[in-house]
Amino acid sequence: MSFFLDIFSVVAVSAGAFFFLAGSIGLLRFPDALSRLHALTKADNLGLGLIVLGLLPRAGGLLAALKLVVVWLLILLASATVSQMVARVARRGGSPS
Amino acid sequence: MTVVSALAMVLALILLAIAAYTVAARRTFAAIEGFVAYGLLLSIAWVALSSIDVALTEAAIGSGLTGVLLIGAAARLRTTEAALSAERPGAPLRWLAAASSAAVAGGIAVAVLSLPDPAPTLAPAAAEHLASTGLGNPVTAVLIAYRALDTLLESIVVVFALIGVWSLTPDRTWGGRPGPEHAADPNGILAYLARLLPPIGITVGLYIFWVGADLPGGKFQGATILAAMWLLVMMAGLTDTPPISRTWLRILLVAGPLLFIAIGFGGALTAGAVLAYPEGYAKLLIKVIEAALMPTLTLTLALLVAGAPERTAPP
């Protein structure tokens, strides 16, 4: 059983790391602020979610696992808010680069 | 080389790279981005060294609060930045700056590298007398029992820093509200966050303050989170900054350090030394001092970010 849990952790965390990588490449390569934002928020939220999912079986208790999920939810909230605000500034033409 | 030490090496290299970027960055804002990223990575390094207390402080104050202060400063300097970077200092001055920076860095490197192995430590002494304070976290014991004088002066220094910021107020707005008026959309995303997050943030802030007696945490980290929640509500336009002439505000700003001083001198009568705690009451008094410092620190840190008064307020 623990073998399968380990496999699950490795697969989920690797998939999460892949999304982080994809998000970073998107951030560097995409042409304008809005699509860079799209790459960053979508990929990072999913990437972090997958990493949290992979770490859940290793959290060593229900409370620690719940804390991990709460951390992910808080980051989702913050990142969604911040990306909305950055996008608003970018749409008004306030983006410096 | 194990996986962990390989990760530590990678972390150290990234830290050095970001530090170099921060120094070399031409635009002020880019340098601040580097500084904040550096602080967050540094707090991961502190976690890797099992110094959770230092990591929390670095993330909350070193990176978070200082980062916000620097962003505020950069925003004010934006209009003059082009003129400033156009006037380049002469070669001798730049070489002098580089040489003195290198000398300081070299001196620190020599001092660190010439430490005996194992390095001298007071950790066993701190752990040995932990029981007499009634605390479970040796870092808190150092901060508020063994080296209480440092913490007392620190808590006064932040109030002095705020007085320094307030002293930049123009005469006509003296006693008014700090910072610009935030006219955010009351139904916008920021107002939504400012309604949703504070209950969670206040709980976490108070928890970090309370748990600091026995586990990593403490008043500075907790107060930073509370200050951040207050700032969020103010920036979303849901509430305004208080006019600095308010009596309740000024009382709260000095209450923490004053109570600390009072209990400190009380120690001279009851325990035979200034800032000593009488036998058996150490933990109670420490918690009373920390609880009194919390509102002071929260207000001071938030108002430092809010800045000097810019608008007059009705008395």
Image (tube, grey):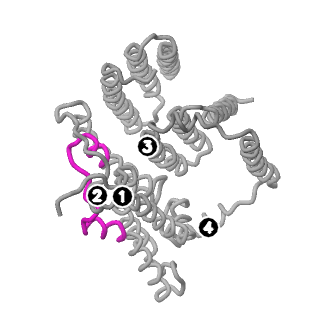
| Residue at image mark 4 | B128
Label 4 crowd bin: few (<14), some (14–19), many (20+), radius 10 Å: few
Residue B291 image-quadrant placement:
bottom left
Residue toward you, B307 or A17 = B307
Same subunit, tags 2 and 3:
yes
Q: Are marks 1 and 2 in contact (CB under 8 Å)?
A: yes
B164 to A13, vertically: above or below: below
Q: Residue at x 50, y 50 (%)?
A: B57
| Residue at image mark 1 | B169
- For marks 2 and 3, give the CA distance: 24 Å
Horizontally, is B23 left or right of B297 in the view? right
Question: What secondary structure is marked by label 2?
Answer: helix
Question: What secondary structure is marked by label 1?
Answer: loop
Check the picture and name the quadrant holding the C terminus of chain B.
Answer: bottom left
- For marks 1 and 3, give the CA distance: 20 Å
Of callouts 4 and 2, which one flags the residue occurring earlier in the amino acid sequence? 4
Of callouts 1 and 4, which one flags the residue occurring earlier in the amino acid sequence? 4
Q: Nearer the viewer, mark 1 or mark 3?
A: 1
Q: Position of residue B234 (x, y in %)?
A: 26, 46
